[in-house]
């Protein structure tokens, strides 16, 4: 009986050995049947290890709970997005409370985002494009910014990139806030009414800050104020956004004013920073410099509807107007109004040189110089009598958002040869960009023949 027990076991062992040997041989000689790793696909099984790699000790428990909720929710649902945003906010909170492993945080953020969205539709390509390297944004102490905003998160508080947020007094470099209302209203058109807003300083001289969003090119209903806080705001300064142009000017004080900024209660940004600020006030009160200089920091702001890469400040000193859609050579009274478009540009050494926030006035005259009344909108204050006006804004040109265009629906009240002039001079002989000064303007002229 002992032999009967041993022989089957030996046979089984020999069979297993032969099977293993055969499998090893096949593995070496034959092609691999393992599917390739898709860098754009959600990989739930890797997220726990990625969370552990970024969050020290047990500090990632909230992120893991939210991650589990995200994976359990239906793909494409608001519940899945909302849970994913909780993880992203936990990633940002940690970056503002201590120095973090930025590479690990970036990998985790990419993994979460791949489970939130169909990233194959992202432009530029995700995650290979450099804009999706979140490590610089997670370097909060060096001015990086990584925040979620939208329905139920952040209300109307600014998103800041500020050096020194972990220890000491935050020095605001740049920031974003809804132009009016709350983030929930500004992001009402986004999936789940939320977005990740992140940024980092690209260079210090010249000062350039890059802002981006997830999903890419998120639209801000009503616009968002982007501030560059360099302590200087001369009358010619405006914010230029690469790929779009010069943004309409707005005061950046809601973002750059340090006394306003430190009141925000977020992890690593609030009571400690406020206490540090007050300590500096007490110490420096004995110094000769004015306290106002300590409490306030000036800067230049601009209105953005979406983010298209880098922001920097430019001095706008010349503005040239041109008709990109001029009045037709022949106009018929019965077919009025006619669409007319004027482009306002400046010489800033960048192809995206259109300027938003310029009041453009159209006026008409016959060959003898006698004024002809025009019909159409008067969007600008002090529009000359008989003229019409519009403010330059961003429009889509060849699929790309571009700044600097004023659109008119033009009507002419008299027949015959007419000269249509586009200028930035109002009824009081003042010209300029709204809330800016010191520019030289070059008008544009078009000719048309108005027939009955």
Image (cartoon, helix red, strand yellow):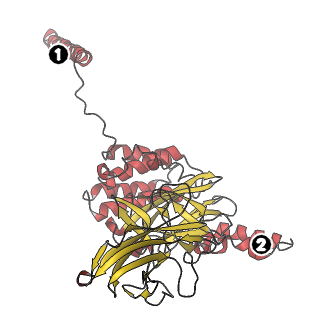
Q: Nearer the viewer, residue 17 or 365?
A: 365
SS category of the residue bearing label 1: helix
Decide: marks 2, 1 in contact (CB < 8 A)?
no
Residue 390 pos. (x, y %) = 43, 79
Tell me, for residue 315, which label it has, or none.
none
Dot 1 alpha-carbon crowd within 10 angstroms: few under 14, some 14 to 19, many 20 or more: few
Q: Which residue is painted at 34% across and 52% down in the image?
A: 122
Q: CA distance from mark 2 to mark 1?
A: 83 Å
> Which mark's residue is nearer the viewer, 2 or 1?
2
Residue 13 pos. (x, y %) = 21, 14
Tell me, for residue 281, which label it has, or none.
2
Residue 39 pos. (x, y %) = 34, 41
Q: Is residue 172 left or right of residue 136?
A: right
Total residue callouts: 2
SS category of the residue bearing label 2: helix
Q: Which residue is painted at 52% across and 72% down in the image?
A: 157
Q: Is residue 352 left or right of residue 294?
A: left
Q: Nearer the viewer, residue 309 or 64?
A: 309
Among the 4 quarters of the image, the one containing residue 166: bottom right
Q: Is residue 4 left or right of residue 370?
A: left
Residue 183 appears in view: yes
Residue 51 appears in view: no
Among the 4 quarters of the image, the one containing residue 298: bottom right
Q: Is residue 7 left or right of residue 440?
A: left
Q: Quadrant of the C terminus?
A: bottom left
Q: Nearer the viewer, residue 13 or 248?
A: 248
Q: Which residue is painted at 25% across and 16% down in the image?
A: 24
Q: Which residue is mark 1?
A: 12
């Amino acid at each position: 009986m002992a032999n009967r027990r041993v022989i089957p076991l030996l046979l089984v062992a020999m069979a297993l050995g032969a099977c293993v040997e055969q499998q090893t041989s096949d593995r070496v000689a034959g092609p691999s049947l393992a599917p390739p790793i898709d860098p754009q696909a959600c990989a739930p099984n890797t997220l726990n290890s990625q969370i552990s790699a970024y969050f020290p000790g047990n500090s990632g428990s909230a992120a893991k709970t939210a991650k589990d909720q995200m994976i359990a929710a239906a793909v494409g649902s608001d519940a899945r997005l909302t849970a994913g945003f909780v993880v992203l906010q936990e990633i940002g909170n940690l970056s503002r409370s201590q120095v973090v492993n930025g590479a690990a945080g970036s990998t985790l953020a990419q993994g979460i985002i791949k489970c939130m969205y169909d990233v194959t539709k992202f432009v530029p390509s995700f995650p290979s494009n450099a804009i999706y390297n979140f490590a610089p944004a997670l370097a909060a102490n060096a001015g990086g910014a990584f925040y979620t905003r939208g329905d139920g998160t952040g209300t109307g508080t600014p998103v800041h990139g500020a050096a020194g947020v972990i220890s000491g007094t935050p020095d605001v470099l740049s920031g974003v806030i809804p132009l009016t209302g709350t983030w929930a209203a500004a992001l009402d058109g986004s999936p789940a009414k939320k977005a990740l807003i992140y940024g980092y300083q690209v260079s210090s001289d010249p000062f350039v800050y890059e802002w981006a969003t997830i999903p890419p090119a998120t639209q801000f209903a009503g616009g968002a104020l982007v501030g560059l806080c360099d302590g200087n705001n001369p009358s010619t300064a405006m914010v230029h956004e690469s790929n779009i142009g010069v943004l309409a000017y707005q005061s950046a004080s809601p973002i750059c004013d340090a006394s306003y900024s430190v009141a925000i209660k977020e992890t690593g940004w609030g009571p400690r920073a406020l206490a540090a600020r007050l300590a500096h006030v007490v110490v420096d009160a004995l110094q000769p410099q004015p306290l106002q200089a300590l409490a306030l920091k000036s800067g230049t702001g601009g209105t953005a509807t979406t983010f298209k890469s880098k922001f920097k400040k430019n001095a706008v000193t010349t503005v040239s107007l041109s008709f990109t859609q001029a009045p037709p050579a022949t106009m018929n009274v019965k077919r009025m109004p006619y669409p007319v478009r004027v482009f306002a540009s400046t010489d800033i050494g960048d192809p995206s040189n259109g300027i938003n926030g310029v009041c453009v006035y159209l006026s008409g005259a016959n060959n003898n110089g006698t004024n002809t009344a025009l019909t159409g909108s008067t969007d600008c204050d002090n529009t000359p009598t008989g003229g019409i006006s519009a403010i330059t804004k961003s429009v889509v040109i060849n699929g790309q958002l571009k700044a600097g265009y004023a659109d008119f629906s033009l009507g002419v009240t008299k027949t015959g040869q007419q000269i249509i002039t586009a200028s930035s001079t109002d009824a009081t002989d003042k010209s300029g960009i709204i809330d800016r000064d010191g520019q030289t303007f070059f008008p544009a002229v078009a000719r048309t023949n108005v027939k009955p």
